[in-house]
Amino acid sequence: MSLAYKVKDLGLAPQGRLQIEWAEMHMPVLMKIRERFSRTRPLEGVRIAACLHVTKETAVLVRTLKAAGAEVYLAASNPLSTQDDVAAALVEDGIHVFAWRGMSARDYYEAIARVIAAKPDLTMDDGGDLTALIHKLHYGEAGEDVEVAKGVVGRVSAEGVVGGTEETTTGVIRLRALAKEGRLLYPVIAVNESRTKYLFDNRYGTGQSSLDGVIRATNLLIAGKTVVVVGYGWVGRGIAMRAHGLGARVVVVEADPVRALEAYYDGFYVTDMEEAARIGDIFITATGNINVIRGEHMRLMKDGAVLANAGHFNVEISVRDLERMAVAKRTVRPGVEEYRLPDGRRVFLLCEGRLVNLAAAEGHPSEVMDMSFSNQALAAAYLVKRKGQLAPGVYKLPKPIDYRIARLKLESLNVKIERLTEEQKAYLRSWRLGT
């Protein structure tokens, strides 16, 4: 097999290997799965096209897939999230990697096209760009991404794809929209809907890593600041929790009435974006939606307001509005752009409005990605085992797999849990027994 790849510098591989070793030390569940996969080889001969953040944690997943017998083609799922030393180390491990930090839009879509050109049996996605591009090429749709991809791969048929997986809330939303139109071409496991994923990765992982990104980029003191969290899904909950723990006054902006009520009873001040814009010091978006912070809000902000995004795509903060309003712009720190407004006020945008936890920091801690990527690995084996049995659609992983991951994680933490007696199990199965 000749190895196709494009990374920044293969000379960075030794440092990348150390980073991967550190992650493996803190991902015991996935390492146990790798040990079993290396014996059973459930992915023997399977080609996997993956579009994921190229981090040390992803490296542990990819090496696990390779140990299971797969040939892996890996592209970045964000132009700024690749850890170049890890990418280099993976190439040395025999992984086809097309990723480097600071990719242009053209580079980004060319890289995704490279993994599509491998004619994969499985797709593994983070945000839905890989899956969407396969479908656009298959249906002959137009778009910048399609034009770039055509130069690499031409027309694509998804006929040979057994199935796929999706890591994020954003990606699952896109998949469900595709399925609703009746155009989804193969079954996809919504890994994001496993409880051992969203209850931990989205809440504790993004909560910690987003604040980590803001702090690394700005070195601001969080205590005493008013932090506006836009969106109160599992990601927003995690960010609000961590900001509060650091001493911030937390304001939540939410459009869903139930989530807004939950934020209120969790002790946060809940209001709309117009009021929040006037009082916030730091704004962190986590909605999965477009233009939740717009020019009309930026005009109301304090001098020195900081804007950061924790959603998958750089669409939540209207950078176009900010560019249009500003009379001057300069880079004041790595990843920190100062926009000066006509009245002299300054607004600071972090990391071009891209994922702050990966663009300014290292992403989620390895311990939490241990569960997320265990779901990915087991989902891949699940799909291959059921080849031809699942109709195109969006699926959850079965609950026993979720429980298996949770039990393995608890074992690694030396945590004991209670076991139900046979009498208790019978009581829960019965409708006859009462008081």
Image (tube, rainbow, N blue to C red):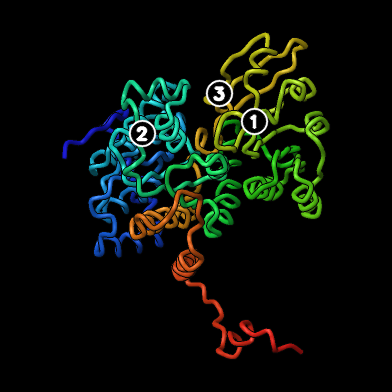
Q: Position of residue 246 (x, y in %)?
A: 68, 47
The label number, if any, that marks residue 333 in the structure image: 3
Specify the quadrant of the image occupied by residue 226: top right
Task: Determine the residue positioned at 47% across, 52% down.
Answer: 189
Label 3 Cα crowd, 10 Å radius (few <14 / some 14-19 / many 20+): few
**C-alpha separation, residue under disc 1 versus residue under disc 2:** 29 Å
Disc 2 vs disc 3: Cβ atoms closer than 8 Å? Answer: no
Q: Earlier in the sequence, mark 1 or mark 2?
A: 2
Residue contact at pointers 1 and 2, CB within 8 angstroms: no
Image quarter where the C terminus lies is bottom right
Tag shown at residue 144:
none
State the residue position of label 2: 84
In the image shown, does 334 or 363 lie closer to the viewer? 363
Which numbered disc, 2 or 3, marks the residue that appears first in the sequence? 2
To which residue does mark 1 refer?
290
Q: Amino acid at mark 1?
A: Ile
Category of crowding for the residue at label 1, using alpha-carbon neighbours closer than 10 angstroms: few (below 14), some (14–19), many (at least 20): some
Q: Nearer the viewer, mark 1 or mark 3?
A: 1
Identified at 34% across, 35% down, the residue is: 116
Q: Amino acid at mark 2?
A: Asp
Q: Secondary structure at mark 2?
A: helix
